[in-house]
Image (cartoon, grey):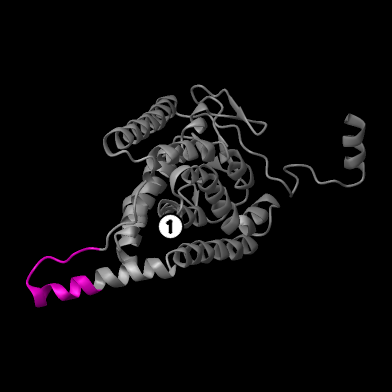
Amino acid sequence: MESVFLLAVERGATLPGQGQLPVPPVLDSDHTAALAMVIALYAGFAAAVVWAVVKLVREREVLPAVLVVSGLIACNAEPVGDYVGQIVYAPDIPWFDYEVLGRQMPSFILVGLASYVAMGGYYAYRYIADGRSLRDIAVVCVVWVGVPEIAMEMLWHHWSVIAYYGDNPTRILGVPLYTIVQNSTLLPVYGVAVYLGARYLKGWSVLWMVVVMPTVTIGYIVGVSWPVYQAIGSSADAWVVWVCAAWVVVASVAASYAALQLPELRELRRRRAEAAEAVPARGGAAPVAQPAEAL
């Protein structure tokens, strides 16, 4: 193996850190912040499990439990996005002993995304099924979910818990611009996926969501972002990175908008808008669009 490596070097192969693959830094985190992050993520997962159990026992609704399981699977695809997105974690994070896809990762990767996939996806679905306007959906996904999530990542970067490494001129307080947009537009895509699952997957078929949600997660993140991932991963010039980042921003918004343009979703929004306009004429409260049947 060593002889093959040396032969590649002699023939001009570019090594990591030599104008090609960026070399990840070794971070030294704020230990208090790192421990708080780990505790918060496990607490969030515990809250999601309790929520799913309550939904199952009190309302006989299976979908939340299925979404929690699908979220756990989606978590374990995280290293794929971290690798191509040039993200590294501080090795001194408590319980840094979880290995997945050949990478040593913090143990919270096991559950970190599950509550977002499950609870975020479920309530985005209910919001969409209720016929809410695109403006209302954007406010919730960007202001109430996207901004706090990005602020949290910026604090993690400040405390050296994580880092987006490589020659990336788009970073804002440590977080790339395209990541800010991408994370803010993911929730509507989750909502549409869960809406379709709740409406069309009946009985045992709902278990297909265990495959759907992880696929949507990694498919969306890598699918809209691959140009900038390639640019950062090959240490491209700054103008190339900016062009690719612009593509990702446009693709993120376009993909989310396109998902919300399904004919039946447009019909739900139209009905709610018509009902709201009819309120003054009737002098009563407006009926709202009924959400799709929940499992």
Whole-percent x, y for residue 98 in the image: 57, 25
The reply to whether residue 158 is visible in this rendering is no
Whole-percent x, y for residue 257 in the image: 45, 66
Residue at point 22%, 63% (across, down): 288
Q: Is residue 276 magenta?
A: yes
Q: Nearer the viewer, residue 15 or 104?
A: 104
Q: Amino acid at mark 1?
A: Val
**Drawn side of residue 216 relative to residue 12, left or right:** left
What is the chief secondary structure element of the magenta stretch?
helix
**Drawn side of residue 216 relative to residue 51, left or right:** right
User: What residue does disc 1 label?
Assistant: 192
Whole-percent x, y for residue 188 in the image: 41, 57
With respect to residue 241, does 34 lie above or below? above
Whole-percent x, y for residue 217 in the image: 52, 48
The reply to whether residue 83 is visible in this rendering is yes
Residue at point 33%, 59% (across, down): 129
Residue at point 50%, 26% (across, down): 93
- Residue numbers of the magenta segment: 274-288
